[in-house]
């Protein structure tokens, strides 16, 4: 499972932590009523990021390569 590769402009982003958003990797509010809250990320300079899709990264919401070791 490969991460979401995004070219982000400076700004504030909210990435889904619950896996239920219909607009992954962004939070769409589907977590409401659960124990989850979105990851708030401030991007100060335009850059490319890898956002975790497998939900196993230790550096969420960013990919840390854990997906490469999953069966
Ligand atoms: S929809 Fe998943 S954290 Fe908001």
Image (cartoon, rainbow, N blue to C red):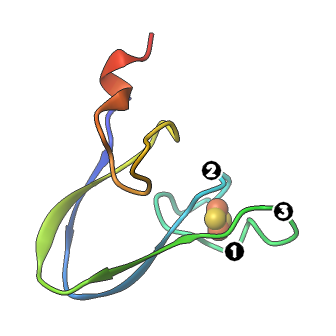
Q: Residues within 10 Å of mark 3 (few under 14, many from 20)?
A: few
Q: Which residue is mark 2?
A: 19
Q: Secondary structure at mark 2?
A: loop
Of 20 and 37, which appears nearest the observer?
Answer: 37
Q: Is 68 displayed left or right of 31 in the figure?
A: left
Q: Quadrant of the C terminus?
A: top left
Residue shown at the point (12%, 71%) measured from the top left: 47
Q: Quadrant of residue 49?
A: bottom left
Q: Which mark is residue 29?
A: 1
The quadrant of the picture showing ligand 1 is bottom right
Q: In the orientation shown, which residue stands out farthest toward the top? A: 71
Residue shown at the point (62%, 72%) measured from the top left: 28
Find residue 43 and report its horizontal and vertical position in percent. 25, 81
Mark nearer the viewer, 1 or 3: 3
* Label 1 near ligand 1 (CB < 8 Å): yes
Q: Is 17 displayed left or right of 29 in the figure?
A: left
Q: CA distance from mark 3 to mark 2?
A: 12 Å
Q: Quadrant of residue 31?
A: bottom right
Q: Quadrant of the N terminus?
A: top left
Q: CA distance from mark 2 to mark 1?
A: 11 Å
Q: Is 24 displayed left or right of 42 in the figure?
A: right
* Label 2 near ligand 1 (CB < 8 Å): yes
Q: Which residue is mark 3?
A: 34
Find residue 38 and report its horizontal and vertical position in percent. 59, 70
């Amino acid at each position: 499972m490969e991460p979401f590769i995004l070219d982000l402009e400076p700004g504030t982003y909210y990435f889904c932590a619950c896996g239920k958003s219909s607009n992954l990797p962004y939070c769409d509010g589907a977590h409401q009523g659960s124990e989850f809250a979105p990851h708030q990320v401030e991007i100060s300079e335009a850059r490319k990021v890898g956002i975790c899709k497998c939900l196993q990264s230790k550096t969420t919401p960013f990919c840390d390569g854990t997906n490469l070791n999953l069966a």
